[in-house]
Amino acid sequence: MQPYLSLLQREWLQHRFGWSLAAGIPLALGLLVVAFGSFEAGEMPPDPEQIRAIAAFASIGGTTVLLFVIACITSLIFMAGLARRDHGDRSIEFWLSLPTGHTPSLAVPLAVHLLVVPAAALVLGWLAGQAVCLVLVGRMGGLAQWVALPWAELLQATLVLLLRFLAGLPLAVLWVLPLVLLLVLMNAWFKRWGWVVLALAVLALNLIDLFTTGQRWLLETAVQLVQRGGLALIGAGGSGLSIGMGEDPAAALGRMPALAWQDFLAALGGLVSPLFAGALVASALGFWLLLRWRAGGAGLSD
Amino acid sequence: MDPNLLVEARSLGVSYGAKRALDGVSFTIPRGRVVGLLGHNGAGKTTLMKALVGLVKPAQGDFAVLGLDPLRDRVALLEQACYIPDVAILPRWARVNDLIGLMSGLHPRFSAERARALLRRTSVDPADKVKTLSKGMVVQAHLALVAAIDARLMILDEPTLGLDVLSRKAFYEMLIDEWCDGERSVLVSTHQVEEIETLLSDVLMLNEGRLVLSIGLEDMDRRFYALAHDPAVAEQVAAAHPLLRYRVGPGSARAAALFDGSPPASVQALGQRVRPSLVDLFIALTRRPELDRTQF
């Protein structure tokens, strides 16, 4: 267990500054915009209480999703260079000289950047969303209105939303993992040309597919994996939260737990499919190829 | 395997595609030895060292390091053998303290306390970031980290390459003072042969992937015969087919010849026996292809 914890610590030590910037800058900008920006709203409910509740929910949920999306983008960029991240300063030879197995050395950064960082971004986003909510609602109606928000329902709804994302995250990662590992492998095998080779390979295979079968099976499969990954996070159940005109916001927010639970069950049910089984097999193969590449010297003799 | 042997290689061969980097290399390293690995650039030194720590897969031969297969038992092997490659390779983003903390978790035989004590012998502060250190300081820090591992074998691939003379001296002083204890062994490759000759107990010489010499330094003195002589008798000495003829002494006034084994008594009488230097022997064994091909 200790090597895994130390490898986790290594990720923190190496990336803490970048992570702080990736989270801190958008949050600061968001707060500034909310504090000093001007807003134009479309059709809004006549009840100011309802407007404030919607604004509070949107600010907490929006901040959570914003940080999550940023974390996913930075993780994707990181994944593209994961295999050779220690080759630039040749510290790969230092890491390879330590008695750490290839499996934890590869699995830990994958887990950190695919699971831990997005999950941390969700939690941080939810917490920071409270501050954004305070500024936004405080600006709309003063601190008293912020205190008067339907907090029990609001916290319950946003926490449930947060938990829904957190529970769906591992499922989403499993859906998109074959594509992520393909990206990592391309970088391992072809260095900085990995993206180019991958793009050319996708184009060539797609054309072959199109001319031989008349379909775009490969491309469609890749698109489906991404779509199913997204649905595993939210939306697998097909229905979202809506607040009708004049509806009591507390009652609408109160529907969130049941909606989220149904949505998660639908995401779980989606795993029972040949596509998901294929994704698991492809991921296992991709990870095995990465292990072989690292065990063969991690491209040091390239 | 003999428990006294830390490394045992038989007919080791490594290929990179069509190129043979190592060919039929056989040698042993007993405990308590300081072994110099000499060879020109591209001779196969780095490949041999990487093979010993499981970073390169041999195409042929049997070998065991600390009784383990470096490829199959890489993790167990690296718990008892430490390795410093040929350049300053500590991660540039880390502080030295970070590395001490990480190695404490990743290496079961690493002592953080000892690493800090060793660092106090250097000009490196544990709070320093690696990227702010000079190359010599990085190498010193790396040695301090590695020397804090309670290992049985240390493998050093050109560890002082590109360092100034003071840094090189400090490096080898720390290595001998703080790590070598008569039980542990060191395999070190370097081009600064003269500087470490006095530290070595054995020497391995590689040439174009083949081992041309594996010998203890006491045996080297017995086996190789260097004859210092007057230039006037050079023709007679050359007729005895020495491995190498060279000049010695101030102003190169004297000539010398290096023989594998004792030359005939009539040739011995032409001069005085002197101790052959490792550099002369290295040149003799690696510069003439027709001699290089011979396994000693």
Image (spheres, coloured by chain):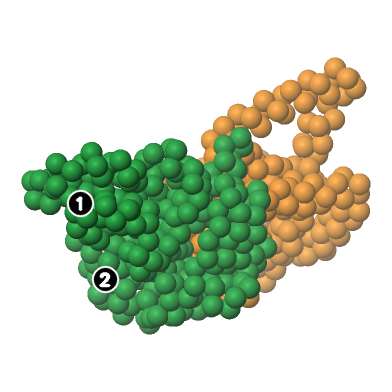
Chain colours: A orange, B green
Q: In this view, does A212 lie above or below A261?
A: above
In the displayed structure, A101 sits above or below A300; it is below
Secondary structure category for the residue under label 2 = helix
Number of other residues with Cα within 10 Å of mark 2, as a class: few under 14, some 14 to 19, many 20 or more: few
Residues at marks 2 and 1, CA–CA distance in whole angstroms: 41 Å
Between disc 2 and disc 1, the foreground one is 1
Q: Where is residue A168 in the image (x, y as percent from the top left)?
A: 75, 58
Name of the residue lying farthest toward the left: B251
Q: What residue type is labelled 2?
A: Glu
Q: Residue at point 49% right, 68% down?
A: B29
A181 or B236: which is nearer to us?
A: B236
Which residue is labeled 2 in the image? Answer: B173
Q: Residue at horizontal 39%, vertical 39%?
A: B288
The percent coordinates of residue A288 (x first, y second) are 73, 52
Q: Is mark 1 on a helix, strand or loop?
A: loop
Residue displayed at 55% across by 53% down:
B25
Q: Is A297 on the left or on the right of B179, as rendered?
A: right
Q: In this view, does B210 lie to the left or right of B199?
A: right
Judge by depth and name the residue closer to the eye, B48 or A6: B48
Task: Report the front residue among B2 and A131.
Answer: B2
Q: Are marks 2 and 1 in contact (CB under 8 Å)?
A: no
Instruction: Name the residue at 33% across, 53% down.
Output: B263
Rendered location of residue B48, percent (x, y): 51, 54
* Residue type for callout 1: Leu
Q: Residues within 10 Å of mark 1 (few under 14, many from 20)?
A: some
Can residue B84 be spotted in the picture? no
- Nearest the viewer among A175 and B87 is B87
Image height check: is B91 above or below A212?
A: below
- x then y, percent, for residue B251: 8, 46
Q: Name the residue under label 1.
A: B270
Furthest residue toward top: A211
